[in-house]
């Protein structure tokens, strides 16, 4: 007797589960990139000197060229 998860896995067409996982992975990568880029640009160009200096020092500590 098969469990429900095994029966569901058998019922899916070949490649469907892998394609769905790939789509989710790409969406997560795109979201992470957009959030990261937004943080870099918003904090890097912030008028608050404390936020800008914190981002600037962090970029230097990660060897990220910023100027």
Image: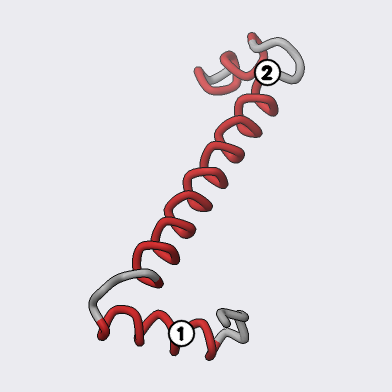
Q: Quadrant of the N terminus?
A: top right
The answer to whether mark 2 and mark 1 are in CB contact below 8 A is no
Say which residue label 1 marks.
58
Figure check: 3 above or below 39 = above
Mark 2 or mark 1: which comes first in sequence? 2
The residue nearer to you, when weighing 66 against 16, is 66
Q: Which disc number belongs to residue 16?
A: 2
Looking at the image, is 43 positioned above or below residue 50? above
Q: Secondary structure at mark 2?
A: helix
* Residue 51 screen position, x and y as percent: 29, 79
> Is 18 placed left or right of 64 in the picture?
right
Provide residue 12's location: percent of width, then percent of height.
65, 12
Q: Residue at x 41, y 56 (%)?
A: 38
Judging depth in this view, the residue of 32 and 57 nearest the camera is 57
Closer to us: mark 2 or mark 1? 1
On the image, the x and y values in percent for residue 22 come to 65, 33
Q: Looking at the rendering, in which quadrant would you find the C terminus?
A: bottom right
For residue 25, what is the image quadrant? top right
């Amino acid at each position: 007797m098969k469990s429900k998860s095994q029966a569901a896995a058998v019922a899916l067409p070949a490649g469907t589960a892998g394609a769905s996982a790939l789509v989710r992975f790409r969406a997560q990568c795109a979201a992470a990139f957009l959030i990261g880029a937004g943080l870099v640009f918003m904090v890097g160009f912030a008028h608050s000197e404390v936020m800008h200096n914190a981002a600037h020092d962090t970029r230097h500590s990660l060897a990220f060229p910023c100027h």
